[in-house]
Image (cartoon, rainbow, N blue to C red):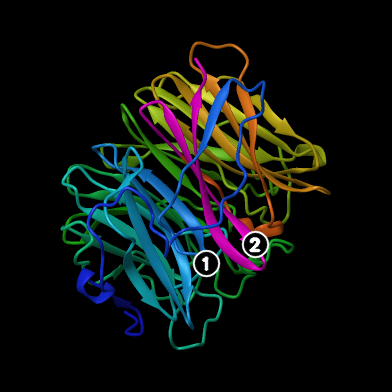
Amino acid sequence: MNTTLRLLSLALLGALAACSRSPGPDAAQPRTAIAADAASGLIVNEWALPVPDGAAQPDLSVGPEGQLLVSWVRKQGDRNAFQYAAYLGDDSWESAPKTIAVGRTLTANWANTPHILMTDDRALWAHWLQTPADGKSPHASDIMLTRSPDNGVHWAPPVAVNDDATGTEHGFVSMWPAGQDAIGMAWLDGRKTAGAMHMHDATKHDAGAAGEMTVRGARFDGALQRSGEAEIDASTCDCCGTDAALTDTGPLLVYRDRSDQEIRDISATHLRVGKWDAPKPVHADGWKMTGCPLNGPSVGAWGPAVAVAWYTAPNDKPVLRLARSKDSGNTFDAPVDVDSGAALQGRVDVAKDGDATWLVWLREDGKGQTVQLARYANAGGAPRTTKLATLAGRGRGTGFPKIAVRNGVAFVVWTDIVEGRPRLVGAKVAPRG
């Protein structure tokens, strides 16, 4: 384990305030113009975040009692800091931001982001990427995992999720609760790809003769001990995110697969009684691509109802698709096309509750980059759609927006870049009437 990466306790952070109702002047960000389109049928308000300027790579998850956990990575001198804050509702935050880990080898990557979640025992779990300190493998990355039993005051010494020590790339992680005091994880694992192209290079063939990128999974208990590790898929897209959701029959994992003919469609698989099913396509798009599109799927679930959203471009025609399932993802209805065209960036995230499926994604054209949102009601009818914001930033630096639903309200977080410096922006969206 790299000794240059050190965990920080609450005491090292200085003056952490008690529960506050606003981010405070030191953490305040310049306001971003966000609003719903007049005909959208949606109400949009700013969600003020207690996040310092310079933050990027957001993650967003819902705790067992409705807490919203927002995490991010922020540059601090020559080191990166992985931090988070907990939202309690009614514009109330649990405390000032807390730091999980900081170090020179903690990786900041626009597409390969850290995650945070809370299990039923109220323990916090967090992972991040770390580069080896030996400098011999500049493109290598290992996945580090830690756990806090006391609301972020103390964090366990991190363990490597991938223990192969091959000096290859690992990442694009999914996490889910696996019982009251354990989690499940799935990740892209490059132990077979030594000598191949790298995840960051989307313009080239990304594995070649050196071996294939795989998807692996494992369970970790409260002592960070692993069990049930398995290879889930022997050949997958090298640099597209994975995602997982808990259905009423257990975890459902989705990811971008890769065939021998370079077809890069979305596959899904269930974990049942400790074993993964054979992966099945969510839909046969037939997208043939010889490089990595850096655009993975997203999944949300509410009981047996499941929604999967993804970017694809068969015949060089970009489209954002949404497929829904009534049986926990065993079968999917034919997808609907949410958005399309050359301006479509994808980078989609999806959230689901008992009333609707929510999506957020990015577009970019000559006028700039925009954050888009759609709500598909379970009762049917046309979706409610809106442009949430026009960004100052362009390209990859704006990363992936995130969305979560709490009490019928969608909370959205995204990265903008203003005067060359990233910042996080938040919005709250609810249906009108």
The quarter of the picture where residue 374 lies is top right
Residue 234: which disc?
A: none
Which residue position holds label 2? 418
| Nearest the eye: 10 or 251 | 10
Q: Earlier in the sequence, mark 1 or mark 2?
A: 1
Mark 1, other Cα within 10 Å: few <14 / some 14–19 / many ≥20: many
Asked whether, in this view, residue 371 is left or right of residue 89, the answer is right
Q: Residue at x 43, y 59 (%)?
A: 51
Q: Position of residue 224 (x, y in %)?
A: 21, 61
- Magenta residues, as a range? 404-433
Near-viewer residue (401 or 301): 401
Q: Toward the viewer: 355 or 175?
A: 355
Disc 1 element: loop
**Side of 153 where 106 appears, left or right:** right
Whether 3 is among the magenta residues is no
Quadrant position of residue 249: top left
Q: Residue furthest front?
A: 25
Q: Is residue 335 visible?
A: no
From the viewer's perspective, is residue 140 above or below residue 282? below
Residue at the extreme right: 366
Label of residue 54 in the image = 1
Rendered location of residue 298, percent (x, y): 51, 40
Of 363 and 324, nearer the camera is 363
Amino acid under disc 1: Gly
